[in-house]
């Protein structure tokens, strides 16, 4: 048997495999290059970028929790112009795809951020952050309302020809409604989920641990939520879904894929073992070989077709 085909095409973008690293957990890619063979993964998703540099929230802004972590970084980033000038030259040298995550405080800022990449070679897709819970203006403010989701994604789509992936929040009444609104607005694919709003209190100081008071919970603790939401959204939308949330190994990734994810993103695991994504790629190839499956695409959504389960 020839080597299994791990490739997947999403919104017209060809990925060598379905394993990506999630925004905010892998820097801009170059930070991890000395210890991770970036050429082995499907895509790097950049830290969220804004029109102007942001310092983020003051420390403490991360806190370890049982089976996860809280973060309230506050979208600290170097800004779009510096990213294009200093980080894109490196990313263009890599075999993996480059997905740029963008955010703004207004719909106009989202559209302007998207337009800045129209003439930048090497940007394969934009991930639109309408789901971060750690900023006072923008992001989840738009991703919590179907109407605002529609308006934001529509504005981004009108500002760029680059494929658009809308990143959805779990902190909503119905993530399916938000996904359908993004699809109607023209989103080419969806990624979900972002972090869940959480909080930790220092019982000795009797004060919140994080300077922002609340933060985003990530890690294995949220995986069942992410898998369920991936399943629900996959049932209703016609565009591809990328699964995120608590993926630490191959079995975790397969849960999302069987639920309907066309690709997955590794986030918090990068802090535990920076090579988690590379190990999942290798494990996925081995899994296909052992089960005599020729193509990764055959695994997508298997849990929605009970008679076709793989033993």
Image (tube, rainbow, N blue to C red):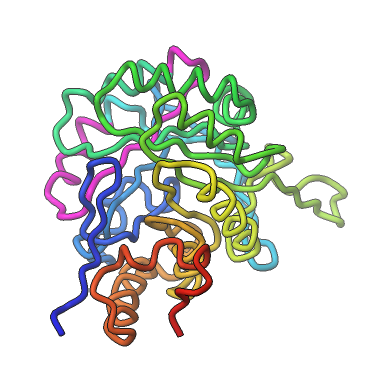
Q: Residue lying furthest top in this view?
A: 108
Q: Is residue 172 left or right of residue 192?
A: right
Residue in view at x 46 percent, y 32 percent: 183
Magenta residues span 83-109
* Picture residue at 69% right of the left edge, 44% below the top: 197
| Above or below, comparing residue 155 to residue 49 in the picture | above
Q: Residue at x 14, y 44 (%)?
A: 92
Say above or below: 196 vs 180: below
Please tell me which residue lies in front, 222 or 243. 243
The image quadrant of residue 112 is: top left
Say whether residue 215 is left or right of residue 154: right
Residue 11 coordinates in the image, percent (x, y): 29, 41
Residue 96: in magenta span: yes
Residue 26, percent across and down?
A: 38, 53
Q: Quadrant of the N terminus?
A: bottom left
Residue 120 position, x and y percent, is 17, 28
- 100 in the magenta segment: yes
Quadrant of the rendered structure where residue 158 is? top left
- Residue 37 in picture, x, y percent from top left: 23, 66
At horizontal 42% and vertical 70% (from top left) the residue drawn is 273
From the viewer's perspective, is residue 286 above or below residue 192? below
Count of marks overlaid on the render: 0
């Amino acid at each position: 048997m020839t080597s299994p085909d791990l490739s997947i095409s999403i919104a017209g973008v060809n990925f060598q495999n379905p394993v990506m690293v999630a925004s905010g957990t892998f820097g801009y890619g170059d930070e991890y290059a000395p210890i991770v063979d970036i050429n082995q993964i499907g895509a790097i998703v950049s830290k969220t970028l804004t029109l102007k540099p942001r310092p983020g929230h003051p420390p403490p802004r991360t806190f370890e929790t049982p089976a996860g972590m809280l973060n309230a970084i506050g979208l600290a980033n170097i800004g779009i112009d510096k990213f294009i000038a200093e980080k894109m030259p490196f990313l263009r040298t890599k075999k993996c795809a480059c997905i740029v995550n963008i955010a703004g405080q207004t719909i106009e800022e989202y559209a302007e951020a998207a337009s800045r990449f129209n003439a930048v070679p090497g940007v394969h897709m934009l991930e639109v952050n309408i789901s971060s819970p750690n900023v006072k203006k923008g992001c989840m403010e738009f991703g919590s309302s179907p109407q605002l989701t529609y308006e934001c994604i529509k504005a981004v789509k009108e500002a760029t020809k680059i494929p658009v992936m809308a990143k959805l929040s779990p902190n909503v009444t119905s993530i399916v409604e938000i996904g359908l609104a993004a699809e109607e607005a023209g989103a080419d694919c969806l990624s979900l989920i972002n972090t869940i709003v959480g909080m930790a209190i220092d019982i000795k100081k009797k004060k919140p641990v994080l300077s922002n008071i609340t933060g985003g919970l990530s890690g294995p603790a949220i995986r069942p939520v992410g898998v369920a939401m991936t399943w629900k959204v996959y049932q209703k939308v016609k565009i591809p879904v990328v699964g995120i949330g608590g993926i630490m190994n191959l079995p975790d990734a397969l849960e999302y894929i069987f639920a309907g994810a066309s690709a997955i993103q590794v986030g918090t695991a990068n802090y535990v073992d920076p090579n988690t994504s590379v190990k999942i790629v290798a494990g996925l190839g081995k899994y296909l070989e052992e089960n005599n499956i020729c193509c990764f695409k055959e695994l997508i959504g298997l849990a929605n077709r009970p008679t076709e389960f793989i033993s």
